[in-house]
Image (spheres, rainbow, N blue to C red):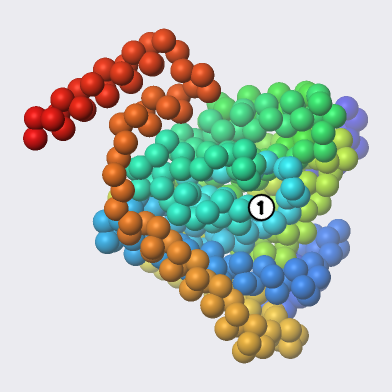
Amino acid sequence: MTSEDVLGLLPADDPVRLIDADGTKVQGSGSERYELPSDADLLRAYERLVVARRLNDQANALVRQGRLAVYPSSHGQEACQVGAAHVLKQGDWLFPTYRDTVAAVERGVDPVDVLTLLKGDWHSGYDPYETQVAPATTPLATQLPHAVGVAHAARLRGESTVVMALTGDGGTSEGDFHEALNFAAVFKAPVVFFIQNNEYAISVPLARQSAAASLAHKGIGYGVPGQRVDGNDIAAVLAVLGDAVERARRGEGPQLIEAHTYRMQAHTNADDATRYRLDSEVASWVDRDPLTRLEKHLRSRGLMTDETHEQARAAADAVAEHVREGLNRDIEPDARELFAYVYAEQTPQLREQAAQVAEESSREVAGR
């Protein structure tokens, strides 16, 4: 690899930004290489950001009501969530983490099914093959080698599939991150590794996780081109991720994208974020909110009307109502499901265990 090749792997000095925090179109910051999405795409993105914000708020409310066991909110990161799903085509795969409920919903999974996992009812809650969305994983970065495997298999079969593998900044400190990037680079797997750098791995700040110039710079060691993007600018996220997906689809191998964003709320409802960060730090990110930024931009150009705004709110209300109805519905647990979905074909041992549970359950019912 020549020094020129190495330079081609380097990300931009500053995160790519197309719309500034005040809603104005940006000149510079790497924007020359990327075009602003169309007006129609921006209006559609606005509606999906409104829906995403409402989904986060509704899920948090259900936690407080005891209907969800836990919810890792993506409040403030909705541009990354919406962008990651919307740059994919039919047949592409999304591999989400536990914080990527919105991305899975934007890819077509019923929000009730996604949240069922966080309610504790099911192993996953949805069929991954119906929407090409893998189960949302809680262990950090374990989904990345799986994502590479799917991408590598698609390439061997001659398919045009691209895989979007999501991870957080904490995930980049895991061994699975290294193994996934190394394998993907060697075999040119069509996968986009999308890091949502929200500054914290639970309570550990980024400075205590990595000494790299940026997380996108880590790609150089594997021979993977990296790029940085303002993760609170949906226009830039769509442009940068869209470019990365098409590069992977053209056979240029894996791509590594780092989005600079911020986790506005605690890690989960079980976390007290005031113990490790200041309120002033959180407040400094309020003006960079992805939703208000895009709204300012659309209004400044006369693209948003009150009717557009109301349509978005109505779509968000409908999703929130659907989630409330689905999650407030009591269920009757069926112990047989413990054995039904372990393997496609049950083993003799599983059949024996299932029969034993069925017998014990029937005796319990008869003894009431």
Left or right of 27, for residue 218: left
Query: Which residue sits at x=70%, y=74%?
Result: 43
Q: Nearer the viewer, residue 167 or 338?
A: 338
Q: Which residue is mark 1?
A: 84
Tell me if residue 85 comes above or below residue 52 in the rendering: above
Q: Nearer the viewer, residue 219 or 336?
A: 336
On the question of residue 282 being in view, the answer is no
Q: Locate the C terminus by quadrant.
A: top left
Q: Residue lying farthest left?
A: 368
Looking at the image, residue 366 lies above or below residue 94:
above
Report the quarter where the N terminus lies: top right
Q: Quadrant of residue 230?
A: bottom right
Q: Which structural element holds mark 1? A: helix
Q: Position of residue 58 (x, y in %)?
A: 41, 65
Answer few, some or many: residues within 10 Å of disc 1's Cα (few below 14, many 20 plus, some between 14 and 19): many
Q: Give residue 20's position: percent from left, percent from top.
A: 68, 72
The residue type indicated by label 1 comes to Ala
Q: Nearer the viewer, residue 256 or 8?
A: 256
Residue 306, horizontal then vertical, whole percent: 62, 89
Name above or below for residue 92 compared with residue 39: above
Q: At which x and y percent is residue 155?
A: 80, 29
Relative to 302, residue 193 above or below: above
Residue drawn at the location 81% of the way across and 51% of the way down: 243
Residue 149 in sight: yes
